[in-house]
């Protein structure tokens, strides 16, 4: 039996976007557009994908500024969730932000996304504010929890 290939994190490429959009539409009710992802790559944000051989399992995008980082999106394909891949991507972003001398990392999460919020808390993020009506929702708008990790 052949050894299983390791799960790797590598830079996101424009050629990944068709697969990323499929995951994005699968896991988010209000997904980012292909243009949002392409612009993030072209702008030079920290855009990464999680993959194993030819299988793209997830992705994340982080924006860096001189003293802080902002995780803009992070998604794991539905059939790969709850296997530690979101944590693996978060660990990568935390390490990258530290290497860039950031003092903190921010992110927003839907109030209803308790699984993600719990993961962020486990990783040391703290809820510091709430953005009222930040996200579109099926019946109006939904609040965003603003979370911060001090590095």
Image (tube, rainbow, N blue to C red):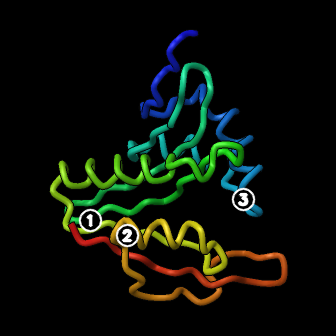
Choose the circle earlier in sequence order: 3 or 1. Answer: 3
Decide which of tag 1 and tag 2 comes sooner along the chain: 1
Residue 105, given in percent of the width and then of the height, sits at 32, 66
Q: Say above or below: 95 vs 109.
A: above
Determine crowd level at label 1: few under 14, some 14-19, many 20+ residues with C-alpha closer than 10 A: many
Q: Is residue 10 visible?
A: yes
- Relative image position of residue 79 (x, y in whole percent): 71, 43
Say which residue appears at 37% left-offset and 70% top-offset: 106
Callout 2: few (<14), some (14-19), or many (20+) C-alpha neighbours within 10 Å? many
On the rendered structure, is 97 left or right of 45?
left
Q: Is residue 36 left or right of residue 87?
A: right
The residue identified by callout 3 is 28
Question: Of marks 3 and 2, which one's residue comes earlier in the chain?
Answer: 3
Q: Is residue 27 above or below residue 47?
A: below
Rounded to the nearest whole Å, what is the CA distance between mark 3 and mark 2? 20 Å
Q: Which mark is residue 106?
A: 2
- Please provide percent x and percent y for residue 131: 54, 86
Question: Which residue in the structure is indicated by mark 1?
Answer: 68
């Amino acid at each position: 039996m052949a050894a299983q290939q390791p799960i790797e994190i590598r830079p996101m490429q424009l050629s990944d976007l068709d697969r990323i959009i499929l995951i994005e539409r699968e896991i988010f009710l209000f997904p980012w557009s292909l243009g949002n992802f392409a612009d993030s790559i072209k702008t030079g944000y920290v855009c990464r994908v999680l993959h194993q051989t030819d299988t793209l399992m997830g992705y994340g995008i982080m924006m860096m500024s001189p003293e802080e980082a902002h995780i803009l999106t992070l998604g794991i394909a539905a059939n790969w969730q709850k296997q530690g891949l979101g944590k693996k991507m978060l660990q990568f972003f935390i390490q990258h932000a530290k290497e860039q001398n950031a003092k903190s990392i921010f992110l927003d999460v839907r109030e209803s996304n308790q699984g993600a919020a719990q993961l962020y808390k486990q990783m040391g993020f703290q809820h510091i504010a709430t953005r009222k009506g930040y996200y579109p929702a099926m019946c109006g708008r939904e609040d965003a929890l603003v979370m911060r990790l001090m590095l």
